[in-house]
Image (cartoon, coloured by chain):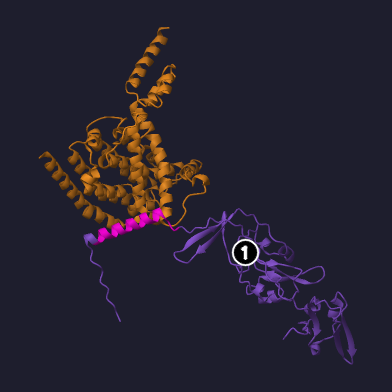
Chain colours: A purple, B orange
Amino acid sequence: MVKVVKSPKDGLIRSAAGHLRAITEVAKVVVSPGTITVHYPRERRKYPENFRGMIMFDMDECISCFRCAHICPANAIQMYPDAEGRYFPGIDYAKCIFCHFCVDSCPTAALKQSKIHDVAYRDVDSMNVSPEQMNTIPEIVREDSVTVEYDFEKDIQLVRKKEFENLLVEVEKPERPEFKAVPQYGENCIGCRLCMFSCPVNAIKSKLEETKVILETDYERCTGCGICVRICPTEVLILTPIEREGDHQ
Amino acid sequence: MAEASLIFILLERILSIFTDELINIPLINPAVEMLLKIPFLNVIVAFILWKPIFHVLILPGLIGMTLVLLFIIYFERKITARVQWRVGPKEVSRRTGGVIQALADGMRYLFQEVIVHRDANAFYFLQFPLISFLPVLLPLLFIPAGGTYGIRTIYTIPAALALISLIPVFIVAMGWASNSKFAYIGSVREAFMYFAYEIPFLLAVVAMIVLYQTSDPFEIVAKQWIPGAVMNPVAFLVFFITVLIATSRLPFDIPEADQEVAFGPYVEYSGIIFGLVMMLPYEKLYLLSMISVILFFGGWNGPEIAILGDLAPVIYLYIKTIVFMCVVSLARSIYARYRLDQSLRLGWGVVFSMSMIALIISVGWMAWLRL
């Protein structure tokens, strides 16, 4: 259906009323403007706990499960080996899209979110952050003493509070399952025994039965470091969480 | 020996010319009397405090105008920002809210290179911004400020307006000397706008002169026991709109439209020369505001302050002028921009007929008061 809208008649009274309305409106705003600018370096907007800022990393918690690297849609996470051959994630912030899939996927909360959103790097190369660099909290220069929040209740307005916000978020540690390297797909084994040689605690043993190599893990010794899982060319070994009694009730 | 005494006699003569018309400010009188006893220095002090020089150089004149320009640019940016829910200039001198922003910009212009591009007519290109101060400062000689005045004639208002009307000529000339596309468009627009506002503007002033039956500001101000804006509001409205057009304030910023022709006639200027030409509309606004205050808001009328003596009326005029300028600069946040054809139609249509009505109202007042 077409609705015909007539243009309002242009009269002297109408235009005079329009002028008056415009002038009173401006006068009203001049007296009390609704400015909602956050004076950023001197005051900071209060962000929610789940704000997707810079990603913090705790190396001690990491179990080298590679989930972050696999899930990263921007291919920004690369796993770097350390001296012991364990792999830890390093994020290339030039690629990172701050989707925080890695943080969500991390089973031990080794990767966690923070409210740091203003990071500067010297050049593009230094944006590729190594695990060691990720492990340290970056130096933060802060000039703010006021935290600002938007109030959307009535008309949008700013609420300023004199408080100093901690940019690091404390995340509740999930109960960390203990992982062991289990030779789950023994039929795939090609007998290269790389796992055996790579194990730092000598937890993997191999037996030769006829033409087949049977792998066995000493679960007492295994630390679940995942080196053998990573090194196995045919994915025989799988890191498997140990199900204790009473876990699934 | 004889030569030395001749010089002293000459100096005495010059001093007596100055001291005849010294501005009388009781607040600084003891200091002035002390300084006048010192030979040689007394001539300089008397020269500065001589009414015409004080008028043109110090209070309503050059120094006062510079202060107003620095303030009004800051004020305009700040008030526009306030209306638009922004913050405006703040970072230069945070404690005062950025008052010296315009001064800082001026300093920056001083250290910037003045580029004269190849196609420009270099001689006129650099000359016009400088000599455009003539039509800005000469009207100040005619516009009196109560206590001080430059030249006192009964043709003050026509003479001042004639000199102010020269400013668009200089702007058009600047655009011509720039020899660039945008500058050309800008100067053609400036010429168009000149035709749009000048006739209603002059008619509004003529209406007020008819109302007061004189063009001597001293008499005009003395006659305003009711402000002229109340006596003839139509003339005031016409004057206000034409001031907006004449000074390229925002609803009518057609010649120097930033978003279309990038500052129009001034597009090729850089450095301190750009600073000078950018000030031109503001200076024009200052002059027109002074005339408007004299014609419509009782000029330097106000309660007498004994301690300031001759300075009090000057300060009244100055403050009223600043308030008027502030109101004019607020107009940019109220109205949307006009197109060239729209403002030409406005100038020749509504405003022109309003100015005729204003003239009729003035004649009516005159006839009624004569009865």
Q: Position of residue A68 (x, y in %)?
A: 69, 74
Is A28 in the magenta? Answer: yes
Q: Does residue B173 appear anywhere in the picture?
A: no
Give the side of residue B65 with respect to residue A220, left or right: left
Q: Nearer the viewer, residue B331 or A145?
A: A145
Q: Position of residue B145 (x, y in %)?
A: 31, 33
Q: Is residue B61 above or below residue A160?
A: above
Q: Secondary structure at mark 1?
A: loop
Q: Is residue B56 above or below residue B269?
A: above
Which class describes the residues within 10 Å of circle 1: few (<14), some (14-19), or many (20+)? many
Q: Position of residue B247 (x, y in %)?
A: 33, 47
Residue extent of the magenta highlight: A14-34
Locate the N terminus of chain B by quadrant.
top left
Give the side of residue A105 with respect to residue B228, left or right: right
At x 82%, y 70%, the residue is: A84
Q: Which residue is mark 1?
A: A115
The image quadrant of residue A56 is bottom right
At x 58%, y 64%, the residue is: A47
Q: Is residue B138 above or below residue B229?
A: above
Locate the C terminus of chain B by quadrant.
top left
Q: Is residue B198 above or below residue B345?
A: above
- Taking the view exactly as shown, the residue that stands out farthest to the top is B1
